Each structure stands twice: as C-alpha cells, then as structure tokens.
Amino acid sequence: MTDVIVFEHVRKEYPDATVAVDDLSFAVHEHELLALVGPSGCGKSTTLRMTNRLVQLTSGRILLDGEDITRVDAVGLRRRIGYVIQHVGLFPHRTVAQNVATVPRLLGWDRARTRSRVGDLLELVGLDPDRYARRYPHELSGGERQRVGVARALATDPPVLLMDEPFGAVDPVGRRRLQVEFRRIQRELGTTVMLVTHDVDEAVRLADRVAVLSRGGHLEQLAPPVTVLSSPASPAVAELVGTGAAVRLLTLGRLEPEDLAPLTAEDVRAADGLGAGGTRSDAVVEVGAPLDDVFAAVARVPGGRVTVHRDGAPVGTVDADGLVAALHRVTGPTPS
Ligand code: ADP
C-alpha cells in the first residue's frame, strides 16, 4: 500500500503561542478517503492546511509522494492537491463554467479541451451543463454551489484532494445525496482524499478510515469506521461517537443469508398473500439491505419478524435476535 501523504511528528504553534497540533504522525494511503474528525478547535483544519502549505508547519515533516512538501514549490504543490472548503468561494461575476475552468485556464489548456472537461465535470457532479454552465453563483442553491466547488476542485483531476467541511453548507437531505455521489466519483477517479469534518455521521459514512483527533491535534484513534464505532480506543473517542454508535453501526452493515431464520409454513402462506395483495410490503426486506432498514422493518411489524426476500422470492425471516447477530458480525470479535 502506497502512502501518499505522510505526517511525521508534525507540530504547529501559531505566533500567539497556541499549539494547534503537537507531534502528529499518520499516513493517508493511495486512493483512500481518510476523514479527520474531532471537536471544534482540535486542529483539523490546521492539519489539512499544512498539507497544501496554506499554513506553515513549525516542526516535523509532511511528505507528499515521498517528497518533503517544503521542498516543492507552492504553486506546483497546489496543482497536485485540490482543495474544497465549506464556503466554496466561487467567483461571483463568473459563470459556473468559467468557475470550473479556472485552473485549466491557468494551466493554459486550449478552449476545446477546457470546454469538454467542464461539461464532463458538471455532469459528474449532477449538474446538467445545458442548464447550469451559464448561470452565475447567485442563481444557484447552496447545494448546487457546493457541487460546482467540487467540480472546480476536480477540474484537473488532482491525485490528492483536501476537503474542509465540504458539505457543511448543504441541507441534511441534499448532503446525504451529495456524500453518496461524491463517494462514487472519488472511487471512480481513484482520488486520495483527506477530509475534515466535525460530523461523526459524515466521517463514518464516507471514510475508508477515520482519524479521531482531540485537542492539540492528538491522534486518539485511526481505524476503519466500524472499529471506531465498536471499539473506541479511548474515552475521548467513546465520547465523540457517543450513544449513537450502535445506530451508526446499523447504517454500515448489511443483512446476510447467515442472519436469517428458516421460513415456517405460516410464513410461506403470509408471503404468498403478500405476493397477491401486496398490502404487507413493509414486512419484507431484501438480502443485502442496510441493517438500519431491517431494524426499521422489525420495529414496525407486529411480532417483530420480517420476511426476507432474495430476487423476489422469500428465503427466510429476520427478527431482533437476527439483527443483533448481524450487528455482532459487522463489529467482529471485540478485543477484551
Ligand atoms: P478545528 O479545525 O479542529 O476546529 P483549527 O485547526 O481551526 O481546529 O484550530 C486549532 C487551534 O488553533 C484552535 O485553538 C484555534 O483557535 C487555533 N488557531 C487556528 N488558527 C489560528 C491562527 N491563525 N492563529 C492562532 N491560533 C489559531
């Protein structure tokens, strides 16, 4: 596994003697999405901004593809690293297309190449170029502006993308959709992403690995989302993931055949009735369904036993016990 970004004993002390980050070491692997999460003021933005040298580190080293970032010229560095922030900072007097084309034009791309790239990117982020390319930022919703910001950051297909609360300005429903779409794009492009968020839900939903920071940029835990939720490494992590951890785990797991109980003759009759009338459709889930959907179904049906289908045919049932077993399967054996 290649390490794209490496922090080695990094410290940042601001001129007023605030130590924002102290002795931070970790690595971001190629193609992964690593989320930095932690309470406000714990040093997340400072960590991100040291990586593209918007903030100068005090001591230690940051390597990009094995190269010390202080030895790369800053302009060259920022071409290799895209940057998305919460308040996107689109140019107000430029159209959507011109905003997305900012960096390609700086790089001297010709018109045809730039135009085709802009069109592709707008489609990628779900904005129809015919409708949006000529609009100005004030003619967009907050979510649409955010999409343009993502498109602009991806314009030159940077291998590395830094994102600071990138979906923070979007309403909850739009945010969820944008997260899912962004994750798809990121996987497709293979972009290595370091993302800062104070939102634990966002971190566990998006990230391959989550780095939990506490005050002073202290790394409390760096692990896959399921591990952070099921085995918090310290009281600070436990406090951050909180009592919602089990519910969040439900969003990460899926129903597998091994979680099912066999169908009884009565179940089969009920399932037949369902096929004909379709009136009890909320009592059915599919194999592979997210566990939070299964939980909702189990909670809803009288008796708490839900028929499970695969390819349209009933293959078993699941109840609260099955759900708990599924949850344990997701979290794996917990270290004692
Ligand atoms: P986070 O992104 O986790 O909210 P920051 O990295 O923004 O945290 O800030 C970490 C600490 O550094 C905070 O105590 C903050 O007040 C301080 N800080 C951030 N920027 C500056 C600055 N330019 N000068 C002095 N202190 C700063």
Image: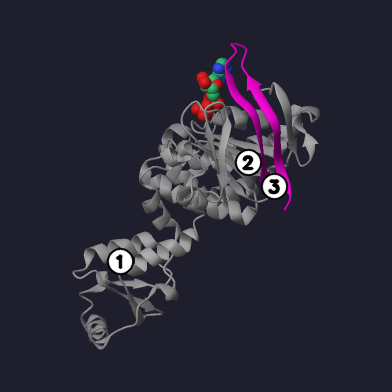
Q: Which residue type does callout 3 highlight?
A: Arg
Q: Which residue type does callout 1 highlight?
A: Ala
SS under mark 2:
strand
Q: Is 147 or 99 nearer to us in this picture?
A: 147
Q: Residue at x 70, y 30 (%)?
A: 9
SS under mark 3:
helix
Specify whether residue 131 is painted magenta: no
Q: In screen coordinates, is 6 left or right of 101?
A: right
Specify whether residue 26 is painted magenta: yes
Mark 3 or mark 1: name the one nearer the start of the chain.
3
Q: Which residue is mark 3?
A: 113
Q: Quadrant of residue 305?
A: bottom left
On screen, 60 above or below 210? above
Q: Which residue is mark 1?
A: 320
In this rendering, the label closer to the viewer, 1 or 2: 1
Q: Which residues are magenta?
A: 1-29
Q: Quadrant of residue 45?
A: top right
Mark 1 or mark 2: name the one nearer the start of the chain.
2
Q: Residue at x 28, y 65 (%)?
A: 297
